[in-house]
């Protein structure tokens, strides 16, 4: 019989997280996983603020409450509390100022567009999968940002030689 693989997160911690709640609701919108994403993101942002305030050139600077930001993730939207400082010199790295989408969201939109989906189809698909209302203008803006890179890639000079190897085989079963 195969041995049970050691879990990355100990069972005791998972039991504490799931205490008093239904396991089925953990994967739903605003369930345990979304709460964990929110808690981890806010903890990382607070750690960035601590690092920022401990650095050089921050004399007289201190925390100044929190601002709210709604961020689109691949599982829906999250409302995060972003820490602020008195001199407004804090620029978070996890979610930069004015960034409304978690990294990776744009790549999914571009991949759907590359597969031939129209902007309206992508809007419907994002609504179905993630429950997020995005405008066709957002989809167009994301895809337009990539079009320059695509045009550059298509206009690149080709190499004089591309080594290719073809393997071809034909297998025929014949009864005698």
Image (cartoon, rainbow, N blue to C red):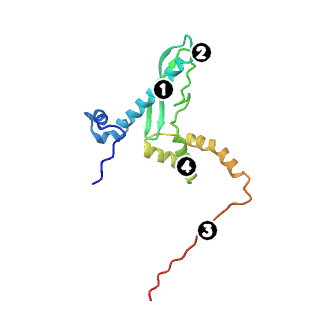
Q: CA distance from mark 2 to mark 4?
A: 43 Å
Q: Residues within 10 Å of mark 2 (few under 14, many from 20)?
A: few
Mark 4: which secondary structure?
A: helix
Whichever of labels 2 and 3 marks the residue nearer the N terminus, that label is 2
Name the residue at the bottom extreme: 176
User: As displayed, is residue 151 above or below residue 85?
Assistant: below
Q: Which residue is mark 3?
A: 166
Q: Which residue is mark 2?
A: 57
Q: Position of residue 62 (x, y in %)?
A: 51, 14
Residue shown at 42%/31% (left/top)?
A: 40
Q: Quadrant of the N terminus?
A: bottom left
**How far is mark 1 from mark 4, CA to CA?**
29 Å
Classify 10 Å Cα crowding around label 3: few (below 14), some (14-19), many (20 and above). few
Q: Which residue is mark 1?
A: 45
Question: How far across and down, in percent of the image, does residue 65 sit?
Answer: 46, 17
Residue at 68% from the left image edge and 49% from the top image edge: 153
Q: Is residue 172 left or right of residue 13?
A: right
What is the x, y in percent for residue 25? 31, 39
Q: Separation of disc 1 and disc 2 at Cα?
A: 20 Å
Badge nearest the viewer, 2 or 4: 2
Assess whether mark 4 and mark 2 are in contact (beta carbons under 8 angstroms).
no
Q: Are marks 2 and 3 in contact (CB under 8 Å)?
A: no
Left or right side of 165 for 92: left
Location of residue 114 with respect to 37 vertically, above or below = below
Q: Look at the numbered disc 2 and give the secondary structure of its residue.
A: loop
Residue designated by label 4: 111
Q: Earlier in the sequence, mark 1 or mark 3?
A: 1
Give the mark nearer the N terminus: 1 vs 4: 1
Farthest residue, direction top: 60
Q: Secondary structure beneath disc 1?
A: helix
């Amino acid at each position: 019989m195969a041995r049970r693989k050691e879990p990355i997160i100990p069972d005791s911690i998972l039991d504490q997280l799931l205490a008093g709640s239904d396991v089925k609701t953990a994967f739903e919108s605003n369930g345990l996983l979304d709460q964990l994403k929110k808690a981890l993101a806010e903890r990382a942002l607070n750690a960035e603020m601590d690092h920022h305030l401990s650095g050089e050139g921050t004399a007289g600077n201190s925390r100044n409450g929190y601002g709210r930001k709604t961020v689109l993730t691949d599982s829906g939207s999250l409302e995060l509390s972003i820490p602020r400082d008195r001199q407004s010199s804090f620029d978070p790295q996890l979610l930069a100022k004015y960034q409304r989408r978690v990294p990776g969201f744009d790549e999914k939109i571009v991949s759907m567009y590359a597969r031939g989906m129209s902007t309206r189809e992508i809007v419907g698909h994002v609504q179905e999968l993630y429950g997020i209302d995005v405008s066709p203008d957002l989809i167009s803006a994301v895809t337009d940002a990539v079009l320059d890179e695509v045009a550059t890639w298509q206009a690149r000079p080709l190499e004089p030689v591309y080594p290719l190897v073809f393997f071809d085989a034909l297998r025929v079963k014949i009864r005698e």
